Amino acid sequence: MRFRRLAGAAAATGMLFALVPAAAGIAAADAGRGGFVYTETNSASGNAILAFARSDDGRLNAIGTFPTHGSGTGSGLATQGEVILAGDNHWLLSVNAGGNDVSVFRVRPDGRLALTDRAPAGGTDPVSVTSFGRFVYVLDAGGSGNIAGFWMDPLGRLHHLPGAVRSLSGPATNPAQVSFSTNGRFLVVTERATNSLDTYPVALDGVAGARVTTVSSGPTPYGFAFDLRNHPIVSEATNSTLSSYRLSSAGATVISASVPTGGLAACWVVVTPDGRWAFDTNAHGGTISSFAIARSGAITLHASVAANTGAGSAPLDLGVSANGRFLYVNESASHRLMAYAIGPGASLTANPNAPALPAGASGLASF
């Protein structure tokens, strides 16, 4: 299949990428441009990004639907990192799992999006994407599974990195997420079917090195997020626990082992911008739990029920605003995008504003 490169208005930006984490500078971007939240429809008949503007009190207002020109699968992907922000929030990337490609958008100052590229994912069934500086990696769950590396030019176009396709630990691993560490030195992949974490060192040219596979602290490692010191905080769905790890060339070493959430099916994880708190959604229990993160990367359960999303609910993807004041949740049973104010001690207060989402909506990116 041939793909048409789309440059458009992005050529006028002249933006260059520095080799800094995508999260760097988000507070400045938030202060100067306001805040926005994005998810994708994952529609099989034509995937699209739904964009919402965030008001000062955390309420969301829809500002547009932006086609990816790719296709989704028609149902939730049950992975983390389907939609991400990159380059100090000037770019948005999303997977098109039904079409085996990735879309790139320029984020305008008003939060609206302009498509700049759509490129093959380097494998089949792309389910998660991550970025660091100008480098991008896609997790492909189809076939034997792999990660594939790219570099993104100043016009928002993706180019394959030579020699940057790496295998997972084997076939049918049911991977859930790929993410760069905070400093960009490692890539981590969670494999649910094998109860494993894959760690890849990343060279200065962006090429991932040989995989080191580590047994997960608990069964079914799922979503994860990094604190400010490169410690991945990983959910484990089967027993609804969270673990934290230290990364090195030898792989992932457990710091805190399988700390219970007190809920059911911990799956998605976010860390607040100050690195002090982690939240997870307990997808089968209708709750959100909070954890305190120490400088060492050790985690302790702070509140088993920091928020209750309601009887019969199924909270999935999470996003946190760049100013650390608001938490957003895809509540997939009622198809709503729920909002919570984050207060002292990581307390959560529900906002009555909850825009509707289509069934199958996946991924959540915010700033």
Image: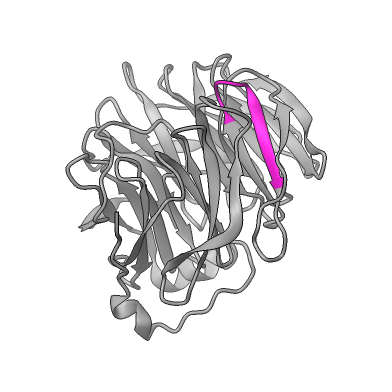
Residue 145 placement, left or right of 166: left
Q: Which residues are magenta?
A: 191-200
Residue 184 at x, y = what percent?
A: 67, 57
Name the residue located 50 percent from the left edge and 57 percent from the top edge.
322
Residue 345 can be seen in this image: no
Name the residue located 55 percent from the left edge and 21 percent from the top edge.
193
Judge whether 218 appears above or below 189 on screen: above
Q: How is the image coloured?
A: one colour
- Does 192 appear in magenta? yes
- Does 250 appear in magenta? no
Where is the N terminus found, in terms of image quarters? Answer: bottom left
Residue 106 placement, left or right of 234: left
Query: Depth check: 173 or 316 in front?
Result: 173
Query: Depth check: 14 or 265 in front?
Result: 14
Name the residue located 30 percent from the left edge and 70 percent from the top edge.
6
Query: Depth check: 223 or 56 in front?
Result: 223
Residue 63 at x, y = what percent?
A: 22, 59
User: Hey, which residue is sitting farthest front in the picture?
Assistant: 1
